[in-house]
Image (cartoon, grey):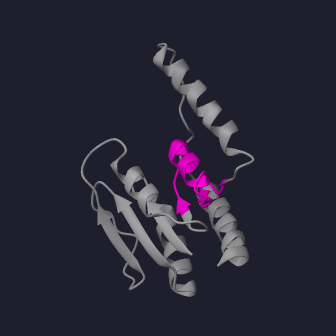
Amino acid sequence: MTLYIDGDAFPNLLKPIVLRSIERLSLNTFVISNKRITIGNSKHIRYIIVEQGADEADHQIVEMVKEGDLVITADIPLADRIISQNAHAIDHRGELYSIDNIKQYLAMRNLAEEIRNSGEMTGGPKPFSQKDAHEFANALHRFLTKYA
């Protein structure tokens, strides 16, 4: 299994959590973003910077991911593309996307986008917290225990 991290908007609180897992399991990891970010120093991590553009990192991840790989992303359309390739996706708050739930998340995301596009003010997602990082750590541990 290879780990892919959608580096654009990756929370700093998650970096040490992910780095520990990468090192503990010697996980082959790619961090893909359109700007330089660092998860940490590890011989298991390769950083790929793509051209500027709305979905350039997403396209690169989809092109590289293989069945059974894991992608960490908060991008629901990307998660949908990953799931369709029989790979796994987990968000920054520890939600493991699956064939059973991804279409529901995608529909909710699209509805919220339509509401925003109509001029309605929405609050957006709540700020990322230490509790969210803890939930992510638990979900990542459960996943890696099962699949890595």
Q: Pick whichever, 131 or 10, lies toward us.
A: 10
User: Picture coordinates of residue 136 (x, y %)?
Assistant: 63, 61
Identify the residue at image location x=54%, y=72%. 17
Identify the residue at image location x=35%, y=68%. 38
Q: Is residue 76 magenta?
A: yes
Q: Is residue 138 magenta?
A: no
Identify the residue at image location x=49%, y=73%. 16
Compared to residue 98, the image places residue 25 above or below, namely below
Q: Magenta span covers which residues?
A: 71-96
Q: Picture quarter containing residue 35?
A: bottom left
Q: Pick whichever, 37 or 134, lies toward us.
A: 37
Identify the residue at image location x=52%, y=86%. 26
Quadrant, the C terminus: bottom right
Q: Picture quarter containing residue 109?
A: top right
Residue 4 in the figure: left or right of residue 96: left
Q: Is residue 117 visible?
A: yes
User: Picture coordinates of residue 29 (x, y %)?
Assistant: 45, 74
